[in-house]
Image (cartoon, grey):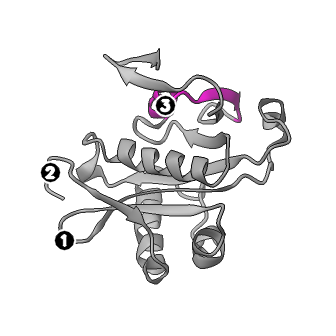
Amino acid sequence: MDKQGQARISLAASGRAEEIKEFVLEMMRDLYPPGSYYENPQDLVFFDDVYVRPANAEFFVAENAAGEIVGTAAFKPYDRRFPEMDPAFGSEPVCEIVKCYVHPDYRRQGIGSHLYTAVEQGAREAGYAQGYLHTSLYLPGGYSFWQSRGYRIGYWESDQIVHMSKDWREADYSRQDGRLAER
C-alpha cells in the first residue's frame, strides 16, 4: 500500500496465523498498559479453529504493497460473557468484533473503515444481525470510530473500557459531513 491508503483487504489464510499474532501483539504492546492484555490470546493460538474453519467467523488483514500486515479486524460468535449486555440482545446469535488494529504509520487513511466494512459484510453474510464489541480509551480514536459506525453504549466497565452494540436490523447509518445520518 502506498501512503494514500490503498490497502489490500483480504481474508486471513491459515498459514499467516503466526504473522497475525505478532502484528496484533505489537499493536497491543504499543496501545495498552502492561498487564492489561493477554500475551498469548487463545483466539490467536487456535487461529484456524476460531477463524478459519467455522462458517460463523472470519479474520481480515490489510496489507501494504509489500504484503506486510498493516491492519486487522475480525468477527466471531459472541459468548455472552458480559451479562450487563444481555438487555441489548435477543436470543439470536450475536457476533463479537475483535482484533481491530491499524499500524500507527497507516492510521487516518481509511484502512480501519475498509476493514470494518469487510467485517460487517462478512458477519451479515454469516447470518448475524447484531454486533458487540468493547473498546478502550487507550485506543486512539477507537471510541469515536465505533460511535461513528452506529454502535451504542451498553455499559462502561471502568473509566477506560466501554461495551457497545449495534443492531444491523435497525436503520443503517453512514458518515456524511462528519455526522451520523440515516440512509
Residue where numbered disc 2 is placed: 3
Give the number of the mark in front: 3 or 2.
3
Coordinates of residue 79 in the picture (x, y in percent): 78, 54
Q: Is residue 34 left or right of residue 7?
A: right
Height in image: 169 above or below 32? above
Residues 95 and 84: in front is 95
- The dot on residue 77 is none
What's the magenta region?
143-157
Q: Amino acid at mark 3?
A: Arg
**Residue at 45% over, 50% down:** 118
Separation of residues labelled 2 and 1 (CA atoms):
12 Å
Q: Amino acid at mark 2?
A: Lys
Height in image: 44 above or below 183? below
Q: Residues within 10 Å of mark 1 (few under 14, many from 20)?
A: few
Residue where numbered disc 1 is placed: 66
**Residue at 62% over, 62% down:** 57
Q: Amino acid at mark 1?
A: Ala
Q: Secondary structure at mark 3?
A: loop
**Residue at 59% over, 78% down:** 48
